[in-house]
Amino acid sequence: MSVYTRFVSGLVFPLQERAKRHTTVRVRREMEASQWWPADRIQELQARRLRELLCAADEVPYWRDLFARLRFDPRAVRGPQDLAALPLLDKPTIRQHVEAMKHPRAQGLARFNTGGSSGEPLVFFIGKERVSHDVAAKWRATRWWGVDIGDPELVVWGSPIELGSQDRIRAWRDRVMRTQLLPAFDMSPARLDEFVGRIRQARPRMLFGYPSALSHIARHAERRGQRMDDLGIRVAFVTSERLYDEQRADIQRVFGCPVANGYGGRDAGFIAHQCPQGGMHVTAEDIVVELLDRDGQPVAPGQPGEIVTTHLATRDFPFIRYRTGDVGVWDTAACTCGRGLPLLKEIQGRATDFVVAQDGTVMHGLALIYVLRDLPAVAGFRIVQESLELTRVQVVPGSGFGVATEEAIRRGLRARLGAGVHIELEPVEQIPAERSGKHRYVISKVAA
C-alpha cells in the first residue's frame, strides 16, 4: 500500500465518514474480525441483530399493523427460521405503503431508487445505519484483494445517482480518492476508444463496473490491438449483473487481472462478494438470506431458489423478507480462505432471465445465449421472449453476417424453444444499455 493510499484510507476517508455521522470505520473493523468467527458464532450474532431489527420494526406503522394481525411477537424470535411466520415483501407492497414503512423517529433518511431494469423503478429510503454498513461491507471485500480506498480506481457505471452528482464537491472528492467515473450508457466505437485511452492514462489499481461493460471494453481493446495487461491493474470488481464465464475470461485475459464478482443492489444491500480463493461469501453479519421455492419453502442444498433478504441495518426503513427476484444456490463446501461466512455457489440471475419452451420446459437464458455466442458473424445481441409463440432477437451484424447466420439463429433457438416458435430478427447498429446502464442479454415476459 502506498503512502498516499494509507493517508486516504486511514485518515481522509474516516474523517469524511465521521463528518457524515456514519459509523463505517467501526463497522468495517468489526466485520474484519467477525468474518473469521466459526459459523455458529456468526449465527448467534445474526439472531441477536434480527431480534433488534424486528423490535424496531414493531414501532413502524406498516410492520406494527402486520405483526398485530399475525400475532407475531418479535421479542420471541430465536433466529432466521422464525421469519417464515411473516409474508414476503415485494416491490408493489413497498410502493403502496412507502410512507408507512418509515420509522416515526427516523432522521436524515436518504431517498433512493432502483434502476427499473425489470419494470417500474422502486423508490425507498435508507438511513445512516444502512449506509454505514453497506459501505463497510464493500470496503471489507475490497481489502480482501490487496487494494484499498485511495488506490487509483476506474469505475464504469450507469446509475443516474452517480452520474447526476458530479458537482464540485463530488469532483474534488473523486480527485482525492483517485476515482474516475466512465458512463456505461454509450458504448459506441468512438466512446470505447476514449475509454481505453482513459484507462491507459489512469493506470488504475482496480476496475469496478458492470461485467457487460468491462468485457465490452476489453474486447474492443483487443480488436484494436491495444495491450491493457501492462497497467498494473490488481483486480476488476464486477456487480449488478450476472457474470458470465466468457465475460470473466475476456476481462482476465485483456486486463491481466483476476475478476471479483459481487452480488447485491441498492434495495437488497451488499449481499455477497467473492474472495481470492473463489468463495462467494454472504455478508451474514448484516443480511439474512433465504433461498425459497415457488411455494415459499426453503430449498434443499444444491437446489435453486429465489433469493429473499432481510437487511439487519434497516431499522429506519425495514427491509424484511424482501424478494430480490434473483435465483441462487447454496454452496455446502467450505471456502479454503477459512472465513466462517455462508457461501452462495451460484447466482443464476433474475427470474426474468429464465425462458420457457413451448412444452413448458423452464431453462436459463444461457441456453439461448450460447446459440448466438457461438456464431462469429454476430457482434452483439439481445433476446426478448415475448410469448411462448414469439421471440424477438436484436442482432448487431458482424463480418460475414448473412442469410446463413440468420437461419443458424432461428434453427438454434427453435431447437430449444420449440419448432413452432416464430423467431423475429432485427438487425441494429448497437444494443443500447437500459436506463440503469446495465445490459441484459435475455429478457423473458413469460412467467417461469
Image (spheres, rainbow, N blue to C red):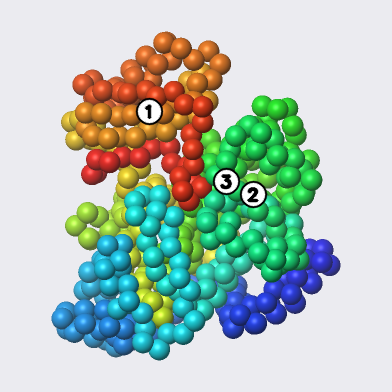
Q: Secondary structure at mark 1?
A: strand
Say left or right for 344 vs 148. left
- List x then y, in percent, for residue 59: 31, 87
Residue closer to the observer: 224 or 246: 224
* Location of residue 221 (image quadrant): top right
Q: Earlier in the sequence, mark 3 or mark 1?
A: 3
Dot 2 or dot 1: first in sequence order is 2
Residue at figure coordinates x 52%, y 73% from the top left: 131
Check disc 3 and report the residue beneath it.
184
Identify the mark at residue 222; answer none if there is no mark. Answer: none
Contact between marks 3 and 2 (CB within 8 A): the answer is yes
Quadrant housing the C terminus: top left
Is 170 placed above or below 103 here? above
Crowdedness near tag 3: few (<14), some (14–19) or many (≥20) residues, C-alpha within 10 Å: many
**Which one is in front, 257 or 238?**
238
Under mark 1, the amino acid is Val
Q: For mark 2, what is the residue? A: 182
Vertical placement of residue 431 versus 205, above or below: above
Query: Residue 225, percent across and down?
Result: 73, 27
Per the image, the residue denoted by label 1 is: 393
Classify mark 2: helix, strand or loop.
strand
Of the pair 138 and 165, the residue shown nearer to us:
165
Quick check: can you spot residue 289?
A: no
- Residue at the spot 66% in from the left edge and 58% down from the top edge: 145
Mark 3–mark 1 distance (CA, rounded to whole Å): 22 Å
Residue 281 appears at what percent x and percent y? 50, 61
**SS for tag 3?**
loop
Query: Taking 23 as reference, is 312 left or right?
Result: left
